[in-house]
Image (cartoon, coloured by chain):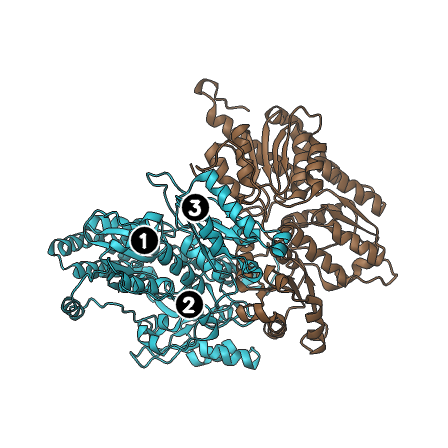
Chain colours: A cyan, B brown
Amino acid sequence: MVTATKKKMVQWDPADVKAELIKKYPPKVARKRAKQIMINEALENETPEITANVRTTPGIITMRGCTYAGCKGVIMGPTRDIVNLVHGPIGCSFYAWLTRRNQTDAGPDGDNFINYCFSTDMQEQDIIFGGEKKLAAAVQEIYDLMHPKSIAIFATCPVGLIGDDIHTVAKNMKDKLGDCNVYAFSCEGYKGVSQSAGHHIANNQVFRHIVGENDTPTEGEFKINLLGEYNIGGDGFEIDRIFKKCGITNIATFSGNSTYDQFATAHQADLNAVMCHRSINYVADMLETKFGIPWIKVNFIGANATAKSLRKIAAYFEDQALIDRVEAVIKEEMPEVETAVADIRSRTEGKTAMLFVGGSRAHHYQELFKEVGMKIISAGYEFAHRDDYEGRQVLPNLKVDADSRNIEEIEVEADATRFKPRKTPVQLVALEDAGVKFKHYDGLAPDMEEGTLIIDDLNQYEAEKLVEIMKPDIFCAGIKEKFSIMKLGVPMKQLHSYDSGGPYAGFQGAINFYHEIDRLTSSKVWTYLKAPWQESPELTAAYVWE
Amino acid sequence: MLLRHTRKEIGERKAVSINPAKTCQPIGAMYAALGIHGCLPHSHGSQGCCAYHRSALTRHYKEPISAATSSFTEGASVFGGQANLLQGINNIFSVYEPDVIAVHTTCLSETIGDDLPQIRKKAQTEGKIPEGKYVIGASTPSYVGSHVTGFSNMVKSMIEFSEKTGRKNGKINIIPGWVEPCDMEEIKRMAKLTGVETIMFPDTSGVLNAPMTGEYKMFPDGGTTIAELKSTGDSTGTLALGEWCSADAARVLDKKCKVPCRVLDMPFGLKATDRFVDAMRTIAGVSVSDELAVERGQLVDMITDMHQYFYKKKVAIAGDPDQVIAMVEFLVSIDMCPVHVVTGTPGKKFEKRIKEITKDKGFEVNVKARGDLFLLHQWIQNEPVDLLICNTYGKYIARDEDIPFLRWGFPILDRQGHQYFPTVGYKGGLRLLEKILGLLLDRKDRDDPEESFELVL
């Protein structure tokens, strides 16, 4: 794209861009948005503060979804042998039906409910007279039809308003059925300010009702849990392939391609590796407090990031055979990656990207772009909190507002019999000194260049303005943003659902992604937007038929 | 097996709906509102509803779907959403400058009892609605009806614009119902060929199949204009296509402005299209053009040429009532046997109509309104079919049971073309037939033993 590259050379002062983004807003909205748009200083500990995890402004076309979407869609959606029953009118269940591309295979037990959509399909009379009886009957009907080992119940907006006691229904049905664990999630869409609240509600209940339920010893060496990986487009499969090759045992992924028993035995792992910090960091904390499992932040998006994360895991276990094995795997996998980069980099070097997704992906994917020599000129999250931008050191300073206070924090104590520190304090200090940082995440800001724009809860208007002004070579966001960006003539890559692509995690995934970026940024299709007669509309002479 | 837990034995289910054949009202209201030129749909509720509806519509139409939300949090849910909507209206007119905001409600705002007309009045008094701009509204709680009734409700609310000046405009109103933008275009083309001047509402053609030009227009050139909507009260008559999607609006207009209306089936297939063209002709007092007669003849030609491949083939079909009724009639008219018929949208008339259409045709029909795809799948397991017609979600059944599969209806998430190639009218009938034939003949080619694998079919 020669023309775009030329246009991009115009240097924009980030302060001017920011001013342009908020110029048209009513004063109150402009003031609020100004605090959510940060010009990055990329200086450690001196990064200016960004406002995040605050309410979306009514009327402003946001990229965000709701608490239910975070709970049912993101966290519980990828579980294959748990029946997810949505208590509410039909829509909520319908929209979360197979739309997140969570891949799975029915295991040896043959259970796979991912392709099904279960709803109590509440009608007006259920809203008026209450839906508890219908909910209990629905649980019974599912049990009679399919005999799942577990049924999860999700509340939608009206359920919270009419006061259906879903937790009591769940408990009663669990007692009645005997061999089916039934529990409920108060994840009404209006709670909190974004999907983030839903992740929290989901994780809390998984921790409360499933984790640690199964003490049958798990087999394997170097046991870990992978937290915050949802197996979109088969990412989890690729990461598992690499683990297996390295000899690392993944007890449970929360929650990509997951099963009830994986959650139930997760307390037996010796390390928790956290991918998506936003959606699940508190589960890592709880697992540490209750069972003594330390956690580290990893990133398997990007080949270098994958190698680095594998080395971190190997270093933690302090086992030379594992360390050697990991090095051997990296050595084996990297040549193919390097060949791909060498081919592609000549076309992608210096091109620019913008990333606005999720609450970690906009950070993770920067690795992949950097590997092919691209620059990230603006990025931000849909539903992050300040620590995702600025690092966990800001956690003690976070103000808890009314919306966050409504989201339950569960108090966890060391398990009386099963708490077992995996490392001695001396070992932990030694590992920290050797570079394995525990409970640590620096956030997005330090990894972005000075003068780049970090924007929380980007909206359609600002997205369009950003693209018009800064003309990135690629824009990454979700399905709602996809076509308005493309209409502007800019390639758009979905980083929630991957546009039916993937996997993009791990080594093979990185190669897939490089090819995808090459395709998107080098394609000729973007040059067809104007017809020849539109390029030079002035008629200087007319041909005359002789 | 993708749906490995679905079993042949059909037990009674009273409480759980599995694999629904419908979704909720607001998405229909959002789609209808996009058919007004310069209109921004607004979802009065939690932002998740709006996000889901925008995502689903985007995935189906492959076009930007702009819509705003009141972004309720817990506070608004307790104290009411008035403040959110007022603020929303103000922000929308300041930032996006639409001509109209079309507000629809959600379960949340309906359950807490927000009074849309009252909030709108307040917005008006407080000067939040600029001169010459409009806010319309529809009540669309998700625990009533389905996406189809939501569509109908928003179309009905458009009648608010209708004015009767007493000066006839000589036009016919056409309410096309929830069809693809290209279908709306095709209906307009047929009207033009018949020599009838029309006002179509809603009209998503040009809005949801807009060209790629390197320029993003939040409000594309298409859509019914406010001037046209106002003028509907002066029209000669209204043709409402589809009892579920369009009839209410037509009747309200009749009542309000004395514009006589006729409710017809959606013009899918031969007979329904015949009735549509005939109705246009008689209302406008014109003769049908030869061009349309030729198109009709071509459809009949293909039906007769290929009849052997349709004859007695069993079909399972799920979709929205107006579409399914017309499609079932089409299938029956070409001697196919739609043996399993499901819609998720409630309505007593549906089962009655399907039974009437299939009466005395030599096969028994399983039909259910308020049905779901789980039940449809069970029916298919008990009595296999040669063809499945359904939205994209049918592909799981089609693969498990190895059935040729025609994607038709809403939503289609995994194929292209539905937004560009109409399936209404005679031309659309040809396309439907071509697709059905292609599927059946591909199957025959796949399954025929080598010795009877033939070049000419």
Q: For the residues marked 3 and 2, what is the alpha-carbon distance in whole angstroms?
A: 27 Å
Label 3 lies in what chain?
A: A
Q: Which of the two marks, 3 or 2, is nearer to us in this view?
A: 3
Task: Say which quarter of the image contains residue A521.
Answer: bottom left
Secondary element under disc 2, as helix, strand or loop, is loop
Earlier residue among tags 1 and 2: 1
Q: Position of residue A111 (x, y in %)?
A: 39, 41
Query: Which mark is on residue A253?
Result: 1
Residue at image mark 3: A114
Of residues A7 and B392, which is closer to you in this image? B392
For the point 56% across and 48% down, which residue is it? B411
Q: Quadrant of residue A539?
A: bottom right
Secondary structure under tag 1 reads: strand
User: Disc 3 or 2, which lies upstream in sequence?
Assistant: 3
Q: Amino acid at mark 2?
A: Tyr
Near mark 3 (Cα within 10 A), the count class, few <14, some 14-19 or many ≥20, is many
Q: Position of residue A13 (x, y in %)?
A: 42, 80
Most extreme residue toward the left is A320
Residue kind at label 1, given as amino acid type:
Thr
Chain of the residue under label 1: A
To the question of a shared chain for discs 3 and 1, the answer is yes
Are discs 3 and 2 located on one and the same chain?
A: yes
